[in-house]
Image: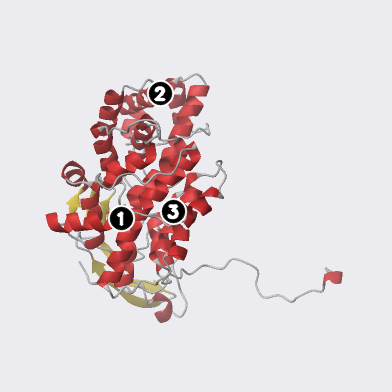
Amino acid sequence: MANTATLEINDKKYEFPLITGTENEVAMDISNLRGVTEGVTTLDGGFKNTGSCKSSVTFLDGEKGVLRYRGYSIEELAEKADFLEVAFLLIFGELPNKEELEKFHADIKKNSIVDEDVKKILDAFPKSAHPMGVLSSLTSALTAFNPDSVDVDSEEDVYNSIVRILGKFPVLVAWAMRKKSGLPLDYGDKNLGYVENILKMMFKVPNEEYTQNQIVVDALDKLLILHADHEQNCSTSTVRIVGSSHAGLFASISAGISALWGPLHGGANQAVLEMLEAIKEDGGDTKKYMAKAKDKADPFRLMGFGHRVYKNFDPRATIIKVAADEVLEDLGVEDPILDIAKGLEQEALNDDYFVKRKLYPNVDFYSGIIYRAMGIPTEMFTVMFALGRLPGWIAQWREMRLNKEPIGRPRQLYTGETARSFTAVEKR
């Protein structure tokens, strides 16, 4: 393959270097396009064809259904690693040895106490507040309680900031849920594993002993791993672009939470359950709604099927389907909403219309089912997504700062009025 690409504009030819990634992806470097062409830019709505950075964190091939963190397949990590191992891998580039993992967990636990004044901020929110809004606000507020700027050239400074957010974030997640549920705030138990403690902080009630369910623990561990990073998606790009202004880690993560909140991104798993509720209210006829989904004239949209990036299958969905089946069987939950979900799943997997178009149930579909079976409120689904995505956001922020990437500043194609003169108000 040639090392350059030629672009012809108004009979003038310009050459731009071609760069090949480690997975043989090819990109045309147009970083000096505007300069050499005297003002020409590209127009790429949604940046679907534009690489904003070089990254060594995550590789995704949507056509082949491949997802790898730092070279490790998502299938192997979900089977053999735990969430903290994956977090360490994403952030620092290699899997930790036993001593590194134990120190990492110990340092996170040391930083798991949130300043008591944060509770005053939480108290100011009404119970009706969406937990994602609460989480974004509390994460941003952590900046006020940890005002020292991070020296990104200092490994110690960056490490301390990382374990601080990994320690405090699950507390904020649990508090957001307990606020919604009217339960007293809880710090869990330092003797538990990271994921086990998250569940205890969320579900422990004051008047009864809390017991762990290992199947639920394992399912949540897998879910967090599967959501840990996903290349340059909307929220990750937001974290990087906010961080490119040299905003701190907490502020950048808070911005990522807000981006994740949207129903076209992290809110998709909540949208799945809202769809299932609507189907139940209309009598629960799955065949009727599958027919509506196939009718192009019908505005109904089947949530949780297919994926913008994966054109074949979502490898995460293949993994989490097994965990969903295990959780539902173990908990023995009798829930018409979950029955409708299973009915839709079977219809889609056996319907030629969906099979030919590769509209398989995706990770949002199965994660919503698992969270509902666990007893997590629908409004908390996206919060759980944020909890899983936290290591990826940290890894991307750290990489962006270490690479000394310039501040993000997209161009535009102006389509407004041309120059005109001001008219006094009495003459308009």
Above/below status of 124 relative to 312:
below
Viewer-proximal residue, 187 or 42?
Answer: 187
Q: Quadrant of the N terminus?
A: bottom left
Q: Is residue 50 left or right of residue 323?
A: right
The residue wearing badge 3 is 257
Provide the secondary structure element on which disc 3 rests.
Answer: helix
Q: Does label 2 or label 3 sit earlier along the sequence?
A: 3
Q: Residue at x 56, y 68 (%)?
A: 414
**Percent x, y for residue 370?**
34, 33
Q: Nearer the viewer, mark 2 or mark 3?
A: 3
Residue at the front extreme of this rendering = 207
Q: Which residue is mark 2?
A: 340
Q: How many angstroms separate mark 1 from mark 2 (CA)?
A: 33 Å
Question: What residue is rendered at 31% in x and 31% in y?
Answer: 355
Q: Residue 54: image x %, image y %?
A: 29, 66
Alpha carbon separation for disc pair 2 and 3: 30 Å
Tag 1 residue: 391
- Label whose residue precedes the other's in the sequence (3 or 1): 3
The amino acid type found where label 2 is placed reads Ile
Q: In the rendered structure, which amino acid carries the disc numbered 1?
A: Pro
Q: Residues within 10 Å of mark 1 (few under 14, many from 20)?
A: many
Q: Position of residue 296 (x, y in %)?
A: 49, 33
Q: In the displayed structure, would residue 292 be above or below residue 7? A: above
Q: Quick check: can you spot residue 143?
A: yes
Of 174 and 400, the residue lying toward us: 174
Going by the numbered disc 3, the residue's amino acid type is Ile
